[in-house]
Image (spheres, helix red, strand yellow):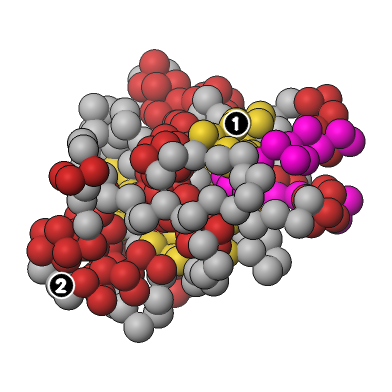
Amino acid sequence: MTEHERVGVRDVARLAGVSAATVSRSLRGSTTVSAATRERVLRAASELDYVPPAPVPAPGATMTVAVLARFPTAWFFAEAIRGVAQVLSAAGYSPLLHDLGDPSGRAQFFATLPVRGRVDGLIVVASAFDDDERAALDSLDLPMTVVGGELPGRAHVGVDDRAGARAAARHLVGLGHRYIGLLSFDPDEACGRETTRLRRLGFTDALAEAGLPVRPEWTLAEGADVAAGARAAERLLSGARLPSAVFAMSDEAALGMIGTLRRAGVAVPGRMSVIGFDDHEMAAVSDLTTIAQPVRQQGEIAARALLETLSGGVPDDVELPTRLVVRGTTAPP
């Protein structure tokens, strides 16, 4: 697209059916805009590939932004990074990806801080840090935004994990399930501890509302990937009794569980219903009921927030809504 054809705020406003001022407030994450309106604006901005005007580079600017992620090849991370890269590249910035998932590589990164003097800012994707790591990042004295997590004093973009998990469990309760299990992330994995805590709280909220207990034998902290779901299913199959439904904290884990259950002759949803979280690209293909979250939009908003910070602005935190997507892996017991 040429400069003459560049998409502007008014184009986004026209597509979203709102004013240009509402678009600006929505992109900043202002709390004066309703969640439904913000979602409509963000969807329009994403469809039009809208990028805010690039900040005027300061003398000595590198025009590079570091992107820090635990598992950059996993679906959530890859989608968020794609959104970050799209906005940064359109604004003339180069994203520089650093993989913090490998323990030795992570230790090396914080020991040497290879981004010092090489980037103008940082975007953190779903990664938490201990006190020493946070101190190291603070020593860089660089603008920073966060996707899918929180860092004190830094603008963050995410979803209401507790509300999303509550909606998942309420869906199962509403179908008539009374024996419900939980396939959880690992609560001892520090980088994802807060997400795990909030989704567990949402799950227990819904069961408490219905007067149902959380059963320890059906609470499985196996992880987030397909292999974790398979392990969880094997543990359930070796138990004395199967739950009639399970909420998995990720779609990948849900899909791993479903595959193992079906290979063992357990019909899904006939004998057991399964709901995930994310709306992974394979969820629709697999007919998986899930809680959808706008992952790529989170990356886009975080990148716009960093550009705003580089321009001297102070972006607000943004919390995007999740939504229940009912497909074929849940049914009455």
| Alpha-carbon span between mark 1 and mark 2 | 35 Å
From the viewer's perspective, is residue 194 above or below residue 100?
Answer: below
Tell me which amino acid carries mark 1: Leu
Residue 185 is left or right of residue 175, and the answer is: right
What percent of the width, then of the height, locates residue 43? 23, 54
In the rendered structure, which segment of residues is drawn in magenta?
Answer: 111-132
From the viewer's perspective, is residue 10 above or below residue 144?
Answer: below
In this view, the residue farthest toward the bottom is 32
Q: How crowded is mark 2: few (under 14 residues within 10 Å), some or many (20 or more)?
A: some
> At 28% across and 58% down in the image, what residue appears?
42
> At 35% across and 65% down in the image, what residue appears?
27
> At 44% across and 74% down in the image, what residue appears?
209
Residue 49, quarter of the rendered image: top left
Q: Which of marks 1 and 2 is nearer the N terminus?
A: 2
Which of the pair 19/201 is nearer the observer? 19
Residue at mark 1: 97
What percent of the width, then of the height, locates residue 125? 57, 44
Residue at mark 2: 18
Q: Is mark 2 on a helix, strand or loop?
A: loop
Q: Residues within 10 Å of mark 1 (few under 14, many from 20)?
A: some
From the viewer's perspective, is residue 142 above or below residue 246?
Answer: below
